[in-house]
Image (cartoon, rainbow, N blue to C red):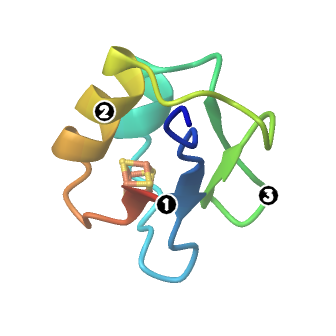
């Protein structure tokens, strides 16, 4: 059996809207009207860039499951 692909999760309430994830992955993350990060597409894959965005998120609110 192959590994199950992990999906990108954002803790919406912990996000402070710094925009760092949007800068690193503008094709994956965007800020919504409440200045919180959201996924542009819910089936976006966890790429190296996405892992980098998660690593740089000061709030540590991007995670994978
Ligand atoms: S890097 Fe983290 S805190 Fe900053 S906008 Fe993205 S999810 Fe929110």
Q: Which residue is mark 1?
A: 65
- How far from the left and from the top, in percent, is residue 41? 81, 34
Tag 3 secondary structure: loop
Which numbered disc, 2 or 1, marks the residue closer to the eye? 1
Which numbered disc, 3 or 1, marks the residue closer to the eye? 1
* Among the 4 quarters of the image, the one containing residue 45: top right
Q: Residue at x 48, y 20 (%)?
A: 25
- How far from the left and from the top, in percent, is residue 17? 47, 57
Question: Of the residues under marks 3 and 1, which one precedes in the sequence?
Answer: 3
Which numbered disc, 3 or 2, marks the residue closer to the eye? 2
Q: CA distance from mark 2 to mark 1?
A: 13 Å
Instruction: Name the residue nearer the viewer: 13 or 3.
Output: 3
Q: Which residue is mark 3?
A: 33
Instruction: Name the residue nearer the viewer: 2 or 14.
Output: 2
Q: Is residue 17 left or right of residue 36?
A: left
- How far from the left and from the top, in percent, is residue 44? 68, 30
Tag 1 secondary structure: loop
Q: Is residue 18 left or right of residue 10?
A: left
Q: Is residue 30 left or right of residue 16?
A: right
Q: Residue at x 32, y 18 (%)?
A: 48
Question: Of the residues under marks 3 and 2, which one precedes in the sequence?
Answer: 3
Q: Residue at x 65, y 16 (%)?
A: 27
Q: Which residue is mark 2?
A: 51
Question: Of the residues under marks 2 and 1, which one precedes in the sequence?
Answer: 2
Instruction: Name the residue nearer the viewer: 13 or 63.
Output: 63
């Amino acid at each position: 059996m192959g590994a199950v692909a992990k999906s990108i999760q954002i803790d919406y309430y912990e996000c402070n809207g710094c925009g760092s994830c949007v800068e690193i992955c503008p094709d994956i993350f965007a800020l919504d009207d409440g200045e919180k990060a959201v996924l542009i597409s819910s089936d976006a894959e966890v790429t190296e860039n996405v892992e980098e965005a998660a690593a740089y998120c000061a709030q540590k609110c991007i995670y994978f499951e």
